[in-house]
Amino acid sequence: MAASKNQFEFQDHLPLIEEKLGGDGLIGELCNGFRLLMDADKGVITFESLKKNSSLLGLQDLSDDDLLSMLVEGDYDGDGALNQMEFCVLMFRLSPDLMEQSEFLLEEALEQELKNSHR
């Protein structure tokens, strides 16, 4: 997929968000991004919803081919759309810095979950 300038700007913000908000905050922001891009009736990101709503995240300059490539790259179950988990995984994959930090974030989330379950 051809990388546009806007994609790199978006990618560069993810490590900053994680640094300022922590792992839970980053996941929350990714969930907010998912909700902005998803088709409200279907509960997933479709090509049409991505094209319609991409300007909300500064991605309006991406071509239809770029948008379709993004969907295909993140669509692990092959249904032609991105569910919330697929979207979050894709965003981590598009940010090399976050890929390096993802193991730490996973451990942090698991520790928090364990603490919450023992209360």
Image: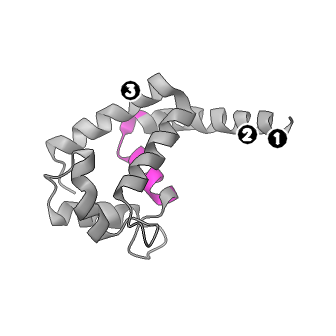
Q: Secondary structure at mark 1?
A: helix
| Residue lying furthest top | 20
Cα–Cα gap, marks 1 and 3: 29 Å
Circles 2 and 1, Cβ within 8 Å, touching? The answer is yes
Q: Secondary structure at mark 2?
A: helix
Give, as a three-letter code, the residue at label 3: Leu
Circles 1 and 3, Cβ within 8 Å, touching? The answer is no
Q: Which residue is more in the foreground, 105 or 55?
A: 55
Point out the stretch of residues depicted in magenta.
85-97
State left or right for residue 87 relative to residue 8: right
Give, as a three-letter code, the residue at label 2: Glu
Residue that mark 2 sits on: 113
Q: Position of residue 27 (x, y in %)?
A: 51, 41
Residue that mark 1 sits on: 117
Residue that mark 3 sits on: 16
Q: Secondary structure at mark 3?
A: helix
Q: Which residue is more in the foreground, 63 or 104?
A: 63
Q: Earlier in the sequence, mark 1 or mark 3?
A: 3
State left or right for residue 73 relative to residue 22: left
Disc 3 residue crowd, few under 14, some 14–19, many 20+, Cα 10 Å: some
Disc 2 residue crowd, few under 14, some 14–19, many 20+, Cα 10 Å: few
State left or right for residue 23 relative to residue 91: right
Q: Residue at x 79, y 33 (%)?
A: 115
